[in-house]
Structure formats: structure tokens, C-alpha cells
Amino acid sequence: MVDVKVVAEQIANRALPSRYPPPLPPLVVTIVEAARLLAMSRRTVYTLLSKGELKSYKDGKIRKIIVSSIEDYVRRRDEFG
């Protein structure tokens, strides 16, 4: 059995290369990614978009959803939860 505390300590003590900065979180996601984040269907994501619950824009043929609008939606849902 793996001791989680030991593994966490090993990871914390490991020297990480400083050549590259840590990756930034995404600012936008696709419909499929938003559906996964929200644990709902793509159809429901499109419904939220049409109601103005989520903000998006088109990048060529691909619709991009702004992550901060997903976070705002989750906060609003949590308030009324």
C-alpha cells in the first residue's frame, strides 16, 4: 500500500526545473470542454449560451466559451443551490 504522506513529501522535495514557467490555466474552452467541466451535455451548454448564462465568441468555425463566465455561472448556481 502506498503511503500518501510519503509520496506527497517526495513530490514536495523534488527540485523542479526552472527553465519553463508553470503552465497558465486556459482563458477559453470549447463546447465539449465546457460540458466536461460542468458535468452536463453539450446541448445543455448550448442552452446556457442561448440564455446568456455563459459568454462565448466564434474563432473561425469553433465556438469558444470564456472560462470566467463558467466560473461565474457556477458561483451563481452555488448561491441559489
Image (cartoon, rainbow, N blue to C red):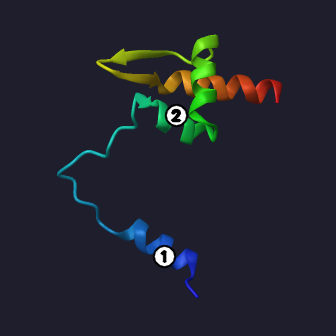
Distance of label 2 from label 1 (alpha carbons): 32 Å
Determine the residue positioned at 56% across, 36% down.
35
Q: Which residue, given by chain and number where applicable, does mark 2 sit on?
A: 34
Of the two numbered discs 2 and 1 on the same chain, state the one appearing first in sequence: 1
Q: Where, quadrant-wise, is the N terminus in this rendering? A: bottom right
- x 41%, y 22%: residue: 63
- Residue sitting at x 56%, y 33%: 42
> Which residue does the numbered mark 1 point to in the structure image?
7
Element assignment for label 2: helix
The image quadrant of residue 47 is top right
Along the line of sight, which residue is nearer the eye, 50 or 3? Answer: 50
Q: Does residue 38 appear to the left or right of 29 in the view shown?
A: right
Q: Position of residue 50 (x, y in %)?
A: 59, 13
Label 2: few (<14), some or many (≥20) within 10 Å? many
Mark 2–mark 1 CB contact (< 8 Å): no
| In the displayed structure image, the side of residue 25 where residue 51 appears, left or right | right
Name the kind of residue labelled 2 in the image.
Ala
- 64 vs 27, nearest the viewer: 64
In this rendered view, identify the residue nearer to me: 48 or 70: 48
Position in image of residue 9 (x %, y %): 47, 72
> Which amino acid type corresponds to the residue marked 1 in the rendered image?
Val
Q: Which mark is residue 76?
A: none
Which residue is drawn at the image coordinates 41% and 23% (left, top)? Answer: 64
Image coordinates for residue 56, horizontal then vertical, percent: 46, 17
Image quadrant in which the C terminus is located: top right
